[in-house]
Amino acid sequence: MATITDVCRLAGVSKATVSRVLNNTGQVKESTRAQVHKAIQELNYRPNGLAQALATQRSNTIGLILSDFNGNFFGDLLQQATQSAELAGKHLIVTDGHDNPEREIAAINMLVDRCCDAIVLYSRFIPEEKLMEIIDELPIPLVVMNRQLPKAPDRCVVFAQREAAHAAVTHLLELGHREIACITARMQTPTAQARLQGYRDALADYGIQYNPNLVAHGQNLIPSGYTACRELLGNGSSFSALFCCTDNMAEGAYRALNEAGLKIPDDVSVFGFDNDIMTAFMTPSLSTVKIPVIDMTKTAIDQVIRLANGEDAFAIPTFHGELILRESVIPFKEENLRAS
């Protein structure tokens, strides 16, 4: 394999000159530049990308840190991030923050050490103050997904979680349901807190008092939806509709309701959140909230590349959900059996 020394010898120039040609820096005569390129082609020399990045402080790469890799949501996010980066002539370096603030911060530092030009971070748990500190101190641009940063609106891609949950529960209320149970996501996250608040706001709009006995706390995954629904069924409360803060938990709730002898939607209407690909194929198909993850991801990548190129940031809009109405929700009827 050819080395930079071989290029220097064949072109008859110094390493510094070859370096300037490779990195497109400094003054080099056109005839010398042509000589170096000819030697590179003859030797089939491949420059050391890391060495170039260290020299220029640019690697033509974008770092992407995800909270985890599970589910179609993150699959869609990753696919769009890859496409957007490629269209901009950038490579994507992807790593997993494991839903842990310390590991997410370690991942940021790792990507900086590898001379990434910019970073997109999907984070649930890093405190807002710490995110602002990182943005202010980091030597490269950082754009955050899934978090609202009032002090840096051009550095965050935000989905209106509370509004979307409010719309879903309002739809159930408009259909006549009044006893509506809720299975929350992990309450340590701003996302879960916002969705629960949207549920509470919708009830309040209809003059319905919040009943903690109609709320069970899940952990996002299918088994926790099953366990939480069994908890609701076993505490003596009745409900004609169930709002699940993730589709995975709705899938678990389906099993618990079926085991209890309750039919969906005849006895209990069920509403999910995320529009996972499986929801259209559940029996009955699940009504849910669609998150515009493709548009959100494209916006995050476009913004961070713009910042990496030294251009002015553009104003990032707040993204809104769309109700996907399917078979799992019907109007309330007094004669319907309800969970008890």
Image: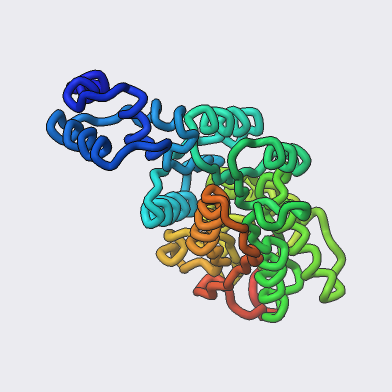
Image position of 5 (left or right of 323): left
Estimate the x, y position of residue 178 in percent, counting from the top left: 76, 72
Residue 236 visible, this angle:
no
Q: Nearer the viewer, residue 336 or 10?
A: 10
Estimate the x, y position of residue 305 in percent, counting from the top left: 51, 52
Q: Nearer the viewer, residue 212 or 318?
A: 318
Task: Identify the image's colour scheme: rainbow, by chain, secondary structure or one colour.
Answer: rainbow
- Which residue sits at x=48%, y=61%? 294
Residue 51 visible, this angle:
yes
Q: In the picture, which quadrant includes the C terminus?
A: bottom right
* Vertical side of 306 occupied by 28: above or below: above
Q: Nearer the viewer, residue 82 or 13?
A: 13
Image position of 234 (left or right of 253): right
Estimate the x, y position of residue 224 in percent, counting from the top left: 60, 44
- Which residue sits at x=58%, y=73%? 323
Q: Nearer the viewer, residue 80 or 282?
A: 80
* Vertical side of 216 occupied by 336: above or below: below
From this viewpoint, which residue is outermost toward the left?
42
Which image quadrant for residue 102? top right
- Which residue sits at x=20%, y=27%? 11
Q: In the picture, which quadrant includes the N terminus?
A: top left
Which image quadrant for residue 42? top left
Which image quadrant for residue 41? top left
Estimate the x, y position of residue 124 in percent, counting from the top left: 65, 44
- Which residue sits at x=37%, y=33%? 20
Image position of 47 (left or right of 248): left
